[in-house]
Image (cartoon, grey):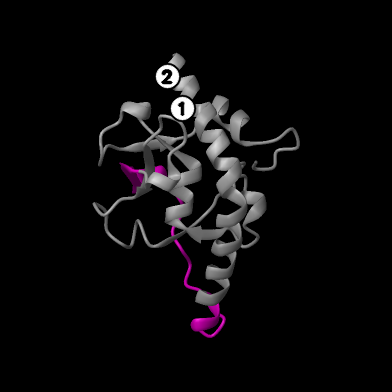
Amino acid sequence: TAAGAALRSDAARGTRRALATSHASSVAGASDAAAAHGGAREEAPSCSCDCCTVSERRPDEYVGSIHVKCSPSDEHSSDKCAPQCTLDDNDEVLGSSVPDKVLDYQRYCFYECKPADGPESLAMAQCVDLERADLQLVLDARGNPV
């Protein structure tokens, strides 16, 4: 639909702008967390959009008419949906920018998931995985996130 195409296009533009800054802070945060635990890190559960629900974007996150995003859900237990998760080895969106494959769920939900009902989704609705067509909008010709 036209609304879905607009959401994917707006999301891709927002992703391009935000990815560079969030990558630097997430990598730094993961390094700080590992150092705080003596260099050892507990194994984080696998990432899944099942742990993400729709929430309102902050005004500085608005992209065109898109005012919703996916964020970590408070509805699941912390053993399944911990603060951090582990990407699949073949992750196509953030995989190449996360060397140890562990990242904050906040970042995973925002970049790897989408509201199931598009821009009209209600808060607390479930988020779903990006589809193949969505990946084409957030990856460059070499497969790097943009």
Say if residue 102 shows up in the picture.
yes
Viewer-proximal residue, 16 or 107? 16
Q: Which residues are magenta?
A: 34-56
Q: Furthest residue to the right?
A: 142
Viewer-proximal residue, 51 or 11? 11
- Quadrant assignment, res 21: bottom right
Q: Is residue 131 magenta?
A: no
Residue 51 located left or right of residue 88: left
Q: Is residue 72 above or below residue 28?
A: above
Image spot of residue 101 (x, y percent) = 58, 58
Q: Residue at x 37, y 44 (%)?
A: 57
Marks 1/2 in contact by CB < 8 Å: the verdict is yes
Residue 5 located left or right of residue 75: right
Image spot of residue 30 (x, y percent) = 54, 69
Say if residue 131 shows up in the picture.
no
SS class, disc 1: helix
Mark 1 sits on what residue? 7
Viewer-proximal residue, 121 or 78? 121
Looking at the rendered structure, the kind of residue marked 1 is: Leu
Mark 1, Cα crowd under 10 Å, few <14 / some 14-19 / many 20+, is many
Mark 2, Cα crowd under 10 Å, few <14 / some 14-19 / many 20+, is few
Q: Furthest residue to the bottom?
A: 38
Image spot of residue 132 (x, y percent) = 56, 27
